[in-house]
């Protein structure tokens, strides 16, 4: 399996590459007043309304500061993954398009199923429910995100 | 472009000939529509960016024109793929009528027309339920039994006409029945009996207001089987259901006193008319259906107009108290100081409740493409959807019901407060006058005291009949002579006549006359002196400066005399020398009310706050009449009149007791003490009649 990896702070996260629609640097959001504080806002991606989550905030850290390398990681909706979801073991994340703000994009990493270990109780400050599994890379730990859980509240 | 058109036309023709159709997944059409919308946006941006280049690049401008037109056509055609004929709904009604008539033994024929009119699928799907309730209402309440119909020389079989037609950007559905029609007086009485309307407010209700009452909660309830199952619903729910699909409903009385129901529907749900507003530098869209009007308060005005009732801000608008919401606060946005101190209030209507929504800026009306609100924001209740603005940014569409609900507007509480609030206001500023401001020619303002006005009716130009040189409208089943200010006053006529105008009908005149005015501006409460010297003409009381505008005060009674010299009200003072009345009253509210009444009849009125004060004033100036309250501090009404009767100079001056006490005992005591007449508060007509008889006996 291939994972798109990215950093939030110093932590390396990964999401199945088949789940990723695109990565962009459109940083003009429409804030949504009276909504959860880890939702950054909305933007228009070719007519699709994307809800952008501040991933750091969602994980219990401080708000993401927008810098040169800050990007949006946009995920495919269930409609967009409908043909491949079951065969590729993708998560169901609903029909509303979502994306995460990330601090820096990483490499695409090929991981064998057997290398993915179940999540320990906690990985640093990240609580277990948000983790689908961990992969020990050569000199760091890759945390596979549980997207379904992150956007459920 | 030409080739494209030709192929296009040819293909369509072939398709028609062979009557070919294919099944297409609706999701695919929805997706196509999104891309079409996107294409429109990209086109707009392209056009903006290339305006400069068209001069330097030959041929560019015609290419751009082609792209422009083709884009619009594509979007329109894709929208058309979702259209369905309204007959899908109409075809279900014969059965409904048959079922209902079998139950209640009425005979009804249903005629439908315009079934070919197309509407967006989502509108068509949600149209049956509201129309079914309307049908139920008509069959149940409007259409008589066959026996009654025959007795009234009508055809035994009643007729319900259901027709659809397109007008402007809307589809109209008229439902016309030839039943007994709506008895507006009965509706009003029921509303008063059930506490929906206060008895003292009822007389201000015009025909349209009364018909509007039919849409109040619990007014007409029926149990009916709908698509959503068996349920108890009312006309109120019909309005709700229609508003959800961007529609509206109105009831009117037709030419033969029958019932005419008009439903207006958007061609498509996907595009709705809206108003774009700004709060804290952020744009929001508000569906236009819920917007009633926009009120702007300039700096300094807000103290006057936004008041606190039960610690909640309210706006006084034409004698109503509207709860005020600050969108910024409802949405928990941080408070920002603005340089611009103008307060902009959008008067919104949700259900039958009105409220004012304060926003920072109000832009133009815009047709927006509605997109879903992502599920992450459903908790907020404040949002109905999202849309993409012309510049490509996302804006949130506000859900007005949700906004009101979030702010927990307690409308019922406020309605009870309205009257109390009014009275308290009166007590606080007893010299305040409530004026109706209106405009005839542009920029020429007039004012009338609200206490003199019985009703204000909205009329359309076609409602006016011309007989001889006079104009008439139908009002409460009678014809009412209507006049225009420019006919009798030295003022200008409006530059152009709008199709909608207003008729002001004054109170307490024997031969009512309506005054046509061009535009109602506002109702205000001011403490102002009327200057009767600077601008004087027959039919004018005078003028005053209100908020820097010169406002003329027409004298209704004089106007009526001018318009119908043969029928002059008897109550009005008959000689030109003003009679002066001393009004002795301790309650500020009644003091100002009675003063208004007396002044409205043309008398000059001096005020005294109790018997002692009254006696002092009575001995220092000559009065033609005393109007005296009974229960007062320091010296009551009985003592006052006894003192008057003992004074040789004042012995002959008539005195009228005006009181809330209505016992025979107090009446007897009043006459014994020396009063010449006794009236119970506050019946204006009787008061003026008695005053007139005492002065001119």
Image (spheres, grey):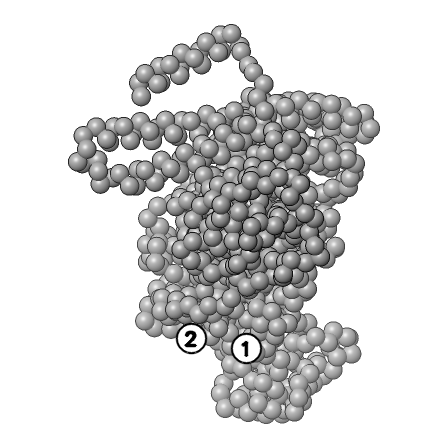
Residue B370, can we see it? no
| Quarter where residue B534 is shown | bottom left
The span from disc 2 to disc 1 (Cα, nearest Å) is 14 Å
Residue A80 in the image: above or below residue B313: above
Which of A134/B138 is in front? A134
- Residue B531, position as x, y percentages in the image: 38, 73
Residue B157 in the image: above or below residue B464: above
Which of the two labelled residues, at mark 2 and mark 1, occupies the earlier sequence position? 1
Mark 2 lies on residue: B529
The subunit letter for the residue under badge 2 reads: B
The subunit letter for the residue under badge 1 reads: B
* Quarter that holds the N terminus of chain B: top left
Mark 1 lies on residue: B430
Question: Residue at 49% across / 11% down in the picture?
Answer: B16
Residue B433, can we see it? yes
Question: Residue at 68% across / 58% down in the picture?
Answer: A122
């Amino acid at each position: 399996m291939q994972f798109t990896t990215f950093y939030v702070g110093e932590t390396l996260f990964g999401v199945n590459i088949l789940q990723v629609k695109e990565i962009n640097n459109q940083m003009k959001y429409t804030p949504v007043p009276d909504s959860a504080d880890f939702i950054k806002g909305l933007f228009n991606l070719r007519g699709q309304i994307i809800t952008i989550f501040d991933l750091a905030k969602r994980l219990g850290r401080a708000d993401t500061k927008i810098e040169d390398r800050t990007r949006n990681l946009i995920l495919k909706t269930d409609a967009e993954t409908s043909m491949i979801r079951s065969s590729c073991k993708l998560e169901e994340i609903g029909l509303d398009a979502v994306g995460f703000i990330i601090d820096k994009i990483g490499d695409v990493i090929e991981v064998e199923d057997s290398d993915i270990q179940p999540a320990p109780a906690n990985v640093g400050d990240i609580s277990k429910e948000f983790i689908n599994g961990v992969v020990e890379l050569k000199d760091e730990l890759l945390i596979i995100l549980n997207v379904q859980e992150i956007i459920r509240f | 472009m030409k080739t494209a058109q030709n192929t296009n036309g040819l293909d369509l023709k072939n398709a028609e000939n062979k009557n070919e159709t294919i099944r297409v997944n609706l999701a695919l059409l929805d997706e196509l529509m999104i891309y079409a919308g996107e294409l429109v946006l990209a086109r707009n941006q392209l056009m903006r960016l290339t305006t400069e280049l068209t001069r330097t690049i030959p041929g560019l401008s015609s290419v751009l024109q082609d792209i422009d037109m083709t884009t619009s056509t594509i979007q329109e055609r894709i929208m058309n793929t979702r259209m369905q004929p309204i007959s899908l709904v109409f075809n279900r009604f014969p059965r409904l009528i048959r079922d209902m008539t079998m139950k209640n033994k009425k005979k009804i024929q249903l005629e439908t027309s315009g079934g070919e009119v197309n509407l967006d699928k989502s509108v068509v799907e949600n149209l049956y339920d509201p129309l079914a309730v309307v049908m139920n209402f008509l069959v149940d309440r409007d259409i008589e039994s066959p026996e009654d119909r025959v007795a009234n020389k009508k055809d035994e079989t009643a007729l319900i006409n259901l027709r659809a037609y397109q007008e402007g950007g809307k589809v109209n559905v008229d439902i016309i029945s030839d039943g007994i029609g709506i008895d507006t007086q009965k509706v009003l009485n029921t509303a008063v009996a059930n506490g929906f309307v206060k008895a003292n407010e009822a007389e201000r209700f015009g025909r349209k207001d009364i018909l509007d009452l039919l849409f109040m909660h619990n007014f007409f309830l029926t149990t009916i089987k709908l698509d959503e199952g068996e349920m108890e619903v009312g006309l109120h729910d019909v309005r709700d259901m229609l508003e959800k699909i961007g529609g509206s409903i109105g009831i009117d009385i037709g030419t033969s006193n029958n019932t005419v129901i008009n439903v207006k529907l958007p061609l498509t749900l996907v595009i709705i008319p809206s108003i774009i507003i700004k709060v804290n530098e952020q744009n929001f869209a508000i569906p236009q259906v819920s917007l009633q009007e926009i009120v702007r308060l300039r700096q300094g005005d807000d103290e006057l107009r936004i008041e606190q009732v039960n610690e909640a801000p309210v706006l006084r608008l034409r004698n109503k108290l509207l709860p005020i919401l600050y969108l910024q606060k409802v949405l928990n946005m941080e408070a920002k100081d603005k340089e611009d101190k103008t307060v902009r209030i959008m008067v919104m209507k949700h259900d039958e409740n009105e409220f004012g929504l304060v926003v920072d800026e109000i832009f133009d009306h815009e047709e927006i493409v509605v997109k879903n609100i992502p599920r992450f924001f459903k908790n907020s209740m404040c949002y109905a959807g999202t849309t993409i603005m012309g510049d490509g940014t996302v804006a949130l569409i506000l859900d007005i019901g949700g906004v009101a609900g979030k702010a927990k507007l307690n409308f019922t509480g406020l309605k009870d407060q309205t009257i109390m609030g009014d009275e308290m206001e009166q007590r606080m500023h007893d010299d305040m006058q409530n004026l109706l401001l209106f405009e005839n020619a542009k920029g020429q303002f007039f004012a009338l005291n609200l206490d003199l006005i019985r009703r204000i009716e909205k009329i359309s130009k076609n409602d006016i009949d011309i007989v001889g040189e006079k104009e008439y409208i139908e009002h409460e089943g009678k014809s009412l002579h209507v006049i225009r200010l420019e006919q009798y006053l030295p003022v200008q006529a409006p530059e152009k006549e709008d199709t909608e105008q207003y008729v002001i009908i004054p109170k307490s005149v024997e031969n009512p006359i309506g005054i046509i005015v061009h535009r109602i501006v506002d109702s205000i409460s001011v403490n102002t002196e009327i200057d009767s010297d600077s601008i004087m003409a027959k039919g004018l009381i005078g003028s005053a400066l209100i908020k820097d505008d010169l406002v003329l005060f027409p004298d209704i009674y004089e106007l009526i005399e001018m318009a119908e010299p043969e029928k002059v009200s008897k109550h009005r003072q008959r000689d030109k020398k003003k009679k002066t009345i001393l009004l002795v009253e301790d309650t500020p509210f009644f003091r100002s009310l009675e003063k208004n009444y007396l002044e409205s009849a043309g008398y000059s009125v001096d005020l005294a706050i109790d018997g002692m004060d009254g006696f002092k004033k009575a001995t220092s100036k000559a009065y033609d009449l005393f109007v005296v309250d009974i229960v007062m501090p320091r010296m009551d009404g009985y003592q006052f009149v006894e003192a008057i009767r003992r004074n040789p100079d004042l012995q002959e001056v008539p005195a009228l007791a005006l009181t809330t006490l209505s016992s025979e005992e107090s009446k007897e005591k009043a006459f014994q003490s020396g009063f010449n007449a006794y009236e119970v508060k506050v019946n204006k007509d009787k008061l003026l009649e008695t005053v007139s008889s005492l002065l001119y006996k």
